[in-house]
Amino acid sequence: MSVVVFIEHEEGKVKKSGLEAVSFAKGLSKGDVVAVAIGANVSSDELAAVGKAGASKVLHVNDEKLNKGVIQAYSHVLAEAIKSVGAKHIVLAKSSLGDPVAARLAVKLDAALIANVSEVPADENDVKTSIFTGKAFANTKVTKENKIFAIKKNAATVLEDGSEAAVEEFSTELSDDLFVGKITGEDKAKGEILLPEADLVVSGGRGLKGPENWNLIEDLARALNAATGCSKPVSDMDWRPHHEHVGQTGVKVAPTLYIAVGISGAIQHLAGVNSSKVIVVINQDEEAPFFKAADYGIVGDAFEILPKLTEAVKAQLN
Amino acid sequence: MNILVCITHVPDTTSRISFTDNNTKFDTSGVQFIIGPYDDYALARAVELKEANGGEVTVLNVGPADTEPTIRKALAIGADKAIRVNAEPVDSFYVAQQIAAVIKNGNYDLILMGRESIDFNGGMVHGMVGELLNLPAFSPVMKLEIEGDTAKMSREIEGGKEFIEAKLPFIAGCQEPIAEWKIPNMRGIMSARKKPLEVIEPTDSVKNTEVSSYELPPAKGDVKMISKDNVEELVKLLKEEAKVL
Ligand SMILES: Cc1cc2nc3c(=O)[nH]c(=O)nc-3n(C[C@H](O)[C@H](O)[C@H](O)COP(=O)(O)OP(=O)(O)OC[C@H]3O[C@@H](n4cnc5c(N)ncnc54)[C@H](O)[C@@H]3O)c2cc1C
Ligand SMILES: Nc1ncnc2c1ncn2[C@@H]1O[C@H](COP(=O)(O)O)[C@@H](O)[C@H]1O
């Protein structure tokens, strides 16, 4: 039985989350993995490379009308692709596009939707999911044959031992009423490492005192090739854009390394970082609660430590 | 303008999570329940829109009787009436079907929800309800302005936002900074007691998932402290011990 995976791309590149989803599907099933990519703004060479992660085929909906992620149109196209493959299992990575598409597909295909899947299940009917904003897990029994797995970052390790996938074009009728809700524009950081997908994150809190000091965070992030994040008050005060705010009411990150500078470690902030593999905390207050959640800590003044740390990273990583 | 706001009843964001009965039940002892923080943004925006354009705000919760204090709080904040569907909200598709049934029986110009519930964090109910009723659903919406029958929104996407224009009715999953949370005042609290809260029985709906047990993440080991005069050591440890660089 084949598994269909929705893969997203960004600036012409398949996102890592898509490769994770393909690898997840490969781990889930002995059957073929068929990936579906939507939009004309990605090349077939790039798509063929998805084979490395385990896809044998990529269906490419090569349509300019779908260069922007219009949710209802995407859900429709994907449902048609899934029907043409005859798949009963579908995998999507969590994102601002993956989530709403998964929700609509569940209804269209009469499938059980399992959200926040945190690892590849040994038994497809018994799936571990992350709940309470990462504070706990639920072992979820699924009673339906058709299943949609909406996976969290790091639910699977990206496989690299496959060969090139065959890329085929796929198209289907697109009626105008699939384009309700017109996307009139976009305001997006270009060329930045995107926080939700980043493997390394440097985050700053109120301890940085003001936006004019963010070059200290940015310098370290650049040296590490990391994304930048912040605490909620920092984005509330407009020191940093809203999409950088990490926590319960912000982005939930799951990097291999999270460096928190001048952040106290309120429980609502921790809820957004508890899936990180390693946490480093830099704070001048040795009593800061964040140290209890940290793997490594330095007590001291961020303004003194950050420049030194950036230099040390530059010296040791090259 | 008639607005429906779907609210969850969830543990306060500072709650420590634990389980009882051999890890099969959420331990509610000592836990304070609140309106889901994202649902609270939805409610605040709904009340603002009502104040600007007239109309009525209805809050809806799918849950057992113990959610009623949370529903009353929403009435105190400024909703005009409430509906509770008397059922355990165990599976997001089950909840979506209940909400869809209420929308079909009502006459709503706009349906506001939160971006996600903070217990199961699915972020899925809006899309499911949208598909069940063939309505557009947008989430997470950070800005929502309405003029006549058209709305202008911004929706957060990875690394930024996109701007959307849509005709009413539709569903929006809200998040900050769409509005500021509202705190109920004394008059609100008094009047909330008299506002109608209708309890309806669930429609026959399927459940596709069921939790068999819960687990807590493994406890963190001790933090390793490094002197501020030796930051080189930190980089070395991250490379050689933690192997993350
Ligand atoms: C419903 C709800 C949801 C919330 N959601 C979130 C969320 O999603 N994300 C979030 O982050 N917060 C959230 N909060 C807010 C949260 O409770 C905290 O208020 C917030 O995280 C504190 O941010 P902070 O650590 O940057 O600031 P502070 O608590 O002010 O801490 C600043 C820290 O910097 C340290 N410091 C000061 N100067 C220096 C220096 N020179 N060098 C080094 N360290 C220094 C201080 O010792 C202190 O520990 C939420 C709150 C509520 C009620
Ligand atoms: N039991 C419920 N009753 C009313 N609304 C709900 C319920 N569960 C979820 N919702 C709404 O759907 C949104 C998304 O929930 P979820 O998909 O569970 O993350 C929430 O923010 C609420 O607005």
Image (spheres, grey):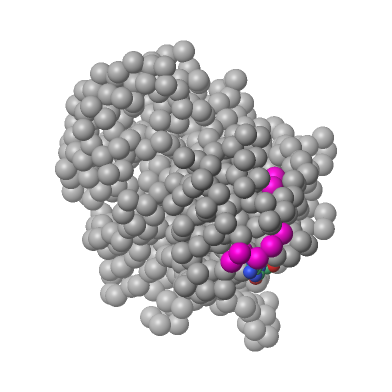
Q: Is residue A226 left or right of residue B75?
A: left
Nearer the observer, B158 or B37: B158
Expressed as whole percent of the image width and height from the top left, the position of residue B32 reads 75, 62
Expressed as whole percent of the image width and height from the top left, the position of residue A224 reads 48, 47
Which range is magenta?
A: A295-304
Expressed as whole percent of the image width and height from the top left, the position of residue A283 reads 68, 61
Nearer the observer, A27 or A115: A27
Query: Going 29% across and 75% down the picture, which residue do you hit?
Result: B147
Q: Quadrant of residue B216?
A: top right
Q: Quick one: quadrant of the N terminus of chain A? A: top left
View quadrant of ligand 1: bottom right
Q: Quadrant of residue B182?
A: bottom right
Q: Is residue B150 magenta?
A: no
Expressed as whole percent of the image width and height from the top left, the position of residue B157 reads 38, 54
Q: Can you say whether A234 is above or below A182 in the image?
A: below
Query: Going 82% across and 42% down the picture, which residue do you hit?
Result: B20
